[in-house]
Amino acid sequence: MGKKEKHNFTNSWIKHSDPYLIAGPCSAETEDQVMETARQLVESNKPHLFRAGIWKPRTRPNSFEGVGEKGLPWLKRVKEEFGLPVTIEVANTDHVEKALKYDIDVLWIGARTTVSPFAVQEIAESLRGVDIPVMIKNPINPDYALWVGAIERLLNTGNNKLAAIHRGFSSISSEYRNTPNWEIPIKLKTDFPDLKIICDPSHISGQRNKVFNVAQKALDLDFDGLMIETHITPDDAWSDAQQQITPQQLSETMSLLTVRSNTS
Ligand code: PEP
Ligand code: MN
């Protein structure tokens, strides 16, 4: 890249509210689990956006791959009953079509999809003319250009309500589930100064006791927001059990994090 990319990102959907907080379970499992997680979040530390995976692209087969379309009305209930906007992962155009049918507020593209230019292009085309924010996770591998390419595919089809999510990169290191490489999101911020960047400490850490430190590091580096997986009974979660925290623990985490005052 080497030069600042001038794009008019429409950031009004993300308020820099120190930090913008996205929380909710890795996966929507049952209607009760989704509603109870949302209720406890609202009571302890209301996030700006509620997340839950409906379609789960798992690295290996024979594990839980999401409840699918039947989870979409549960998210609609979260919106209606708690006044919480909702976000889900979409990995193909069928997911996009169904998400739009159920008034999902924000979409995200997962790390396993960002690696695939054809998949991202199809999603981008299916959103042409649709006014919906999209968050783009970094690809699994530390390939800066691939991440930028996915962002550009959305920009090229007329979507500028974008944000990027750093969720770490696959590596053989055992300290983290997905190793953070802070230089890559910092470069993104330098090249696209108006693009909001969110950190996902849950998928970086892979373990709940590391979530705080990774979140603090991201805030120290001026990230705009955090996406933190939250479950009412984390040890029973159907996916990513080790890294999820309870709404109460999220509330404690948020109160302990130090936010640098934004001077810009
Ligand atoms: C998720 O957010 O639950 C998820 C599958 O994330 P990633 O694409 O970062 O692995
Ligand atoms: Mn997860």
Image (cartoon, helix red, strand yellow):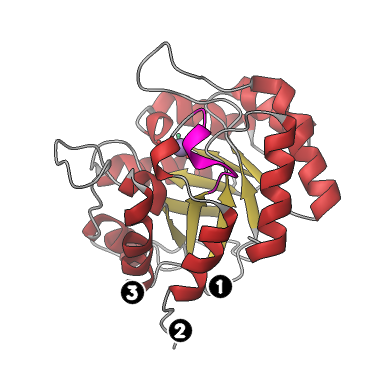
Which residue: 34% across, 46% down?
207
Q: Are the residues flagged by discs 1 and 2 in contact, CB closer than 8 Å?
A: yes
Which residue: 32% across, 48% down?
204
Which residue: 48% across, 30% down?
121
User: Circle 3 — which element?
Assistant: helix
Q: Does the image show residue 105?
A: no
Q: Nearer the viewer, residue 252 or 46?
A: 252
Calculate the distance from the C-alpha at mark 1 to the C-alpha at mark 2. Answer: 9 Å
Looking at marks 1 and 3 on the same chain, the residue that comes earlier in the sequence is marked by: 1
Q: Which residue is mark 3?
A: 220
**Does 234 appear in magenta?**
yes
User: Circle 2 — which element?
Assistant: loop
Query: Residue 102, position in %: x, y?
Result: 78, 33
Q: Is residue 18 above or below residue 248?
A: below
Calculate the distance from the C-alpha at mark 3 to the C-alpha at mark 2. Answer: 11 Å
Q: Which residue is mark 1?
A: 16
Q: Which residue is mark 2?
A: 262
